[in-house]
C-alpha cells in the first residue's frame, strides 16, 4: 500500500531515473512485488538489484519481468539458477565464510565494477538499517505523508553496532510536494563527512 501522493511519487520516479541502479531487499520483493521502473517521470530505468542471500526471489516477481533490464540478484548462494535468463545471479564473495547475508561493502564494489556509480536504496527497513550501520549511505530523501501508521519501524536499532547517535543529517532541506513533505540531506557519520 502506498501512502504517498501523486507529486511525491513523481519525485520518487524522477530520483529513480537519476540513478544507475535501484536496490531493495528480498523482504520488499516478497511483500510489495515492486517494478522499480520509471513510470511517472520521463527518463531511463535504473538497473534493478535485489539483496537476496538464499535466492528466494519468485520467478513471477515483477522485477524478473522488467521491460528492458535483467534483474541482478546479489546473493551468497552460488550455483543455484532457477530463473533462466530473466535474472543475473551474482554471488558476492565474503572474507567471512560464516557470512549469512550479502556483505554490503563487497556488494558495492561489485556493483561499481559493473558500472553502477550511483545507487538508490528504496528499502525496506532491514536493508536501510544495514546500509546506515555500514555507513554506506551518502544522503537521505524522506517522504512524509500526512498519515499516522502505527507499528511500522522505518529504521532498526543503530546503536548496537557502533553507529551511535552522531548520525546526523546536514544540511537538512524540506519542501512540500502536494500534501506530502519531502525532507532531504546528507548523512554526517560521527560528525564528519564520509
Ligand atoms: N515506505 C517505503 O517507501 C517502503 C519502501 C520499501 C519497502 N517498504 C516496506 O518494507 C517492508 C520490507 O522491509 P523488510 O525490512 O522486511 O525487508 P527488506 O529490507 O526489503 O529486506 C531484508 C532482507 O534482505 C536480505 N539481505 C541480504 N543481505 C542483506 C544485508 N547485508 N543486510 C540486510 N538485509 C540483507 C535479508 O534476507 P535474506 O537473508 O534472505 O537475504 C533480509 O531479511 C515491507 O513491508 C515494505 O512494504 C516500505
Image (cartoon, rainbow, N blue to C red):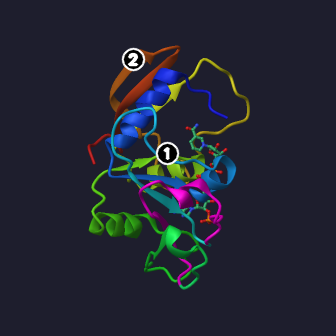
Image position, residue 82 (x, y; %): 61, 77
Q: Main secondary structure of the magenta part?
A: loop
Per the model, the C-alpha gap separating discs 1 and 2 is 20 Å
Picture layout, residue 103 above or below residue 192 = below
Q: Is mark 1 within 8 Å of ligand 1?
A: yes
- The answer to which of 158 and 63 lies nearer the viewer is 63
Image position, residue 111 (x, y; %): 35, 64
Image position, residue 33 (x, y; %): 63, 50
Which residue does the image show at 54% across and 53% down from the upper left?
Answer: 127
Label 1, residues with CA under 10 Å away: few <14, some 14-19, many ≥20 = some
Q: Residue furthest front?
A: 67
Residue 103 is left or right of residue 106, and the answer is: right
Which label number is shown at residue 175?
A: 2
Which residue does the image show at 53% across and 47% down from the upper left?
Answer: 123
The stretch drawn in magenta includes residue 108: no
Picture layout, residue 52 above or below residue 47 = below
Picture layout, residue 106 above or below residue 6 = below
Of labels 1 and 2, earlier in sequence is: 1
Secondary structure beneath dot 2 equals strand
Which residue does the image show at 51% across and 23% down from the upper left?
Answer: 6
Write down the residue under mark 1: 122
The quarter of the image holding the N terminus is top right
| Count of residue discs | 2
Picture layout, residue 129 above or below residue 169 = below
Image position, residue 105 (x, y; %): 38, 65
* Residue range highlighted in magenta: 55-78
Secondary structure beneath dot 1 equals loop
- The answer to which of 52 and 47 lies nearer the viewer is 47
Q: Residue furthest right?
A: 150
Amino acid at each position: 500500500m502506498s501512502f504517498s501522493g501523486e507529486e511525491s511519487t513523481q519525485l520518487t520516479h524522477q530520483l529513480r531515473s537519476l540513478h544507475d541502479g535501484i536496490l531493495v531487499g528480498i523482504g520488499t520483493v516478497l511483500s510489495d512485488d515492486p517494478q522499480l521502473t520509471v513510470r511517472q517521470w520521463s527518463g531511463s530505468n535504473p538497473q534493478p538489484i535485489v539483496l537476496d542471500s538464499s535466492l528466494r526471489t519468485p520467478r513471477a516477481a515483477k522485477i524478473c519481468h522488467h521491460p528492458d533490464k535483467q534483474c541482478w540478484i546479489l546473493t551468497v548462494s552460488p550455483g543455484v539458477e532457477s530463473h533462466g535468463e530473466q535474472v543475473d545471479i551474482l554471488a558476492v564473495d565474503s572474507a567471512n565464510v560464516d557470512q549469512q547475508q550479502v556483505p554490503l561493502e563487497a556488494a558495492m564494489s561489485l556493483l561499481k565494477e559493473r558500472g553502477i556509480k550511483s545507487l538508490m536504496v528504496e528499502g525496506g527497513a532491514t536493508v536501510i538499517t544495514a546500509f546506515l550501520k555500514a555507513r554506506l549511505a551518502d544522503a537521505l530523501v524522506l517522504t512524509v505523508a500526512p498519515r499516522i501508521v502505527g507499528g511500522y519501524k522505518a529504521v532498526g536499532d543503530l546503536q548496537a553496532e557502533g553507529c551511535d547517535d552522531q548520525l546526523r543529517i546536514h544540511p537538512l532541506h524540506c519542501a512540500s510536494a502536494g500534501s506530502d513533505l519531502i525532507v532531504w540531506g546528507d548523512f554526517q557519520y560521527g560528525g564528519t563527512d564520509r
